[in-house]
Image (cartoon, rainbow, N blue to C red):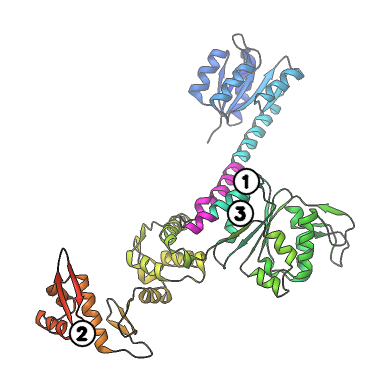
């Protein structure tokens, strides 16, 4: 898009020469010789850049600067004047001017100033865009769920972010979203402009972990040709996320404890202590209290980390959040893969609701992603989910009842399958229980109950008599069993 430049100067020759030079440079240019004309041109032309004379016959350029900035905060304004002085320059820059040049000026210099100002604005907007994208990616909305357990998680994130808690411990099974919680805390805190640096303590060999965390001095070891900054220095002012801290070796745990307590550390081979202004967020899927008891994790480090503890519930304990999670994943994956999936079938969602999700939210996302890649229509169907998920759903749909003998019999709707308990079952008790359920379902209506059981009405009445059932009608139909004692 061609950038538009408005030149405001009461000297016609200056305005003309500036306009000619900038037009030849590829800009769209208009000129104004007075403040009144400049105001009209500003509204009609909507410039990206204004070259504004400080002194005009009917206006003060500094007042016009304020007016233009109020109308468009993104406008680039370069002040020009024959009466350049330090006071007016400082005032113009304080009021939002992007640059200030005095007359006489070099046209090439003006073109360079305009180009530099436009590039600076472009980069600033790009940074703002990516910063907003990062914030959007790690907003609370991405931690989907309205279950009581997730509401408590949201509260803890808010407290940790707003209070600048220096140590936070996030616990939970693999796939529950520990990294997402850590990033949400960082990007909603006063440290959001500083780096978020993460390291997986289980993925780096013990002999390299200290170097990654604290860095090294030149000559610290054979291949150390230059000084290297570690993660704690790289994250200065921000957050260090120690994922899988339960796998951190005991000697390194002692050094992390020292950083927490003194906010200082030494690089490998270094004699001078380096200060570390960082928040430490640690995460683990292990039972740290048990590890402390077993001597596999330092108790003093655990207690320092455990000041603010955010336990993440496994997905099987908050299945009411699954529909919202599925909707969220479909929306995000539609954007990522340029798909147009509109939703999920009731049958498929029923499958997801009955599966226990050992891989938690990560496994659910992967399942939805796979189904979306295979689905040719607009609605995700059950056929694109794994046999484990569909099979668990069938088992979850089982209707079970404890019969009078204490045995348990299970029926799978739709496929007629019956599961026989290992200890066996009384066939009469099964028949008796089915008749009772059918009569209860239809409030004693024998015709409907017989149809449900695929029996004639006379056969049902015979078996009701056999097992001691009578239909009794009061304010509503009920089913009662005779006392055969």
Choose mark 1 or mark 2, whichever is in front: 2
Residue linked to disc 1: 162
Res 458 → quadrant: bottom left
Q: Position of residue 485 (x, y in %)?
A: 22, 85
Cα distance, mark 3 to mark 1?
Answer: 14 Å
Residue linked to disc 2: 484
The reply to whether residue 102 is in sight is no
Earlier residue among tags 1 and 2: 1
For this orientation, the residue located farthest to the top is: 57
Residue situated in front as seen by the camera: 466 or 397: 466
Choose mark 3 or mark 1, whichever is in front: 1
The region drawn magenta spans: 126-152
Q: Image check: 130 left or right of 167? A: left
Q: Position of residue 202 (x, y in %)?
A: 68, 69
Earlier residue among tags 3 and 2: 3
Cα distance, mark 3 to mark 2?
Answer: 67 Å
Mark 2: secondary structure: loop
Which residue occupies 51% across, 67% down? 360
Residue linked to disc 3: 183
Cα distance, mark 1 to mark 2?
Answer: 69 Å
For this orientation, the residue located farthest to the left is: 458
Q: Image check: 310 left or right of 166? A: left
Dominant SS in magenta: helix
Mark number, residue 414:
none
Residue situated in front as seen by the camera: 106 or 159: 159
Q: Position of residue 189 (x, y in %)?
A: 63, 46
Res 123 → quadrant: top right
Vertical order, 141 against 218 (above or below): above
Q: Image check: 166 left or right of 430? A: right
């Amino acid at each position: 898009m061609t950038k538009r430049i408005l030149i405001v100067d009461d000297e016609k020759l200056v305005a003309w020469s500036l306009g000619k030079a900038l037009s030849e440079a590829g800009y769209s240019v208009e000129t104004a010789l007075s403040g009144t004309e400049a105001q009209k041109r500003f509204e009609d032309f909507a410039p990206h850049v204004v070259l504004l004379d400080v002194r005009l016959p009917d206006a003060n350029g500094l007042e016009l600067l304020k007016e233009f900035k109020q109308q468009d905060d993104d406008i680039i304004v370069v002040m020009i004047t024959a009466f350049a002085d330090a006071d007016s320059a400082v005032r113009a820059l304080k009021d939002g001017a992007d640059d200030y040049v005095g007359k006489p000026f070099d046209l090439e210099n003006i073109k360079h100033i305009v180009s530099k100002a436009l590039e600076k604005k472009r980069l600033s907007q790009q940074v703002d865009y990516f910063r907003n994208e990062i914030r959007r990616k790690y907003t609370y909305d991405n931690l989907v769920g309205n279950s009581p357990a997730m509401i408590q998680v949201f509260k803890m994130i808010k407290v940790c972010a707003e209070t600048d808690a220096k140590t936070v411990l996030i616990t939970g099974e693999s796939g529950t979203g520990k990294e997402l919680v850590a990033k949400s805390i960082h990007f909603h805190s006063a440290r959001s402009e500083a780096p978020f640096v993460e390291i997986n303590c289980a993925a780096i060999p013990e002999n390299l972990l200290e170097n990654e965390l604290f860095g090294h001095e030149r000559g610290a070891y054979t291949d150390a040709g230059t000084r290297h900054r570690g993660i704690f220095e790289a994250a200065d002012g921000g957050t260090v996320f120690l994922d899988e801290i339960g796998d951190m070796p005991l000697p390194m745990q002692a050094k992390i404890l020292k950083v927490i307590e003194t906010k200082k550390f030494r690089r490998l081979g270094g004699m001078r202590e380096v200060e570390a202004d960082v928040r430490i967020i640690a995460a683990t899927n292990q039972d740290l209290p048990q590890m402390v008891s077993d001597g596999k994790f330092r108790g003093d480090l655990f207690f320092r980390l455990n000041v603010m503890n955010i336990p993440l519930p496994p997905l099987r304990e908050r299945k009411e959040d699954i529909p919202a999670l599925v909707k969220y994943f479909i929306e995000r994956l539609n954007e990522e893969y340029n798909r147009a999936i509109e939703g999920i079938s009731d049958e498929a969602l029923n499958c997801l609701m009955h599966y226990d999700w050992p891989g938690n939210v990560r496994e659910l996302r992967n399942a939805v992603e796979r189904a979306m890649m295979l689905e040719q229509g607009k609605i995700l169907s059950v056929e694109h989910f794994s046999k484990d998920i569909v099979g668990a759903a069938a088992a979850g749909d089982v209707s079970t009842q404890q019969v009078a003998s204490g045995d348990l019999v299970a029926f799978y709707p739709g496929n007629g399958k019956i599961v026989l308990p290992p200890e066996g079952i009384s066939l009469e008790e099964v028949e008796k229980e089915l008749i009772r359920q059918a009569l209860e379902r239809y409030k004693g209506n024998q015709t409907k109950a017989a149809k449900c059981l695929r029996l004639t009405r006379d056969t049902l009445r015979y078996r009701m008599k056999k097992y001691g059932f009578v239909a009794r009608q009061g304010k509503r139909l009920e089913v009662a069993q005779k006392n055969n004692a």
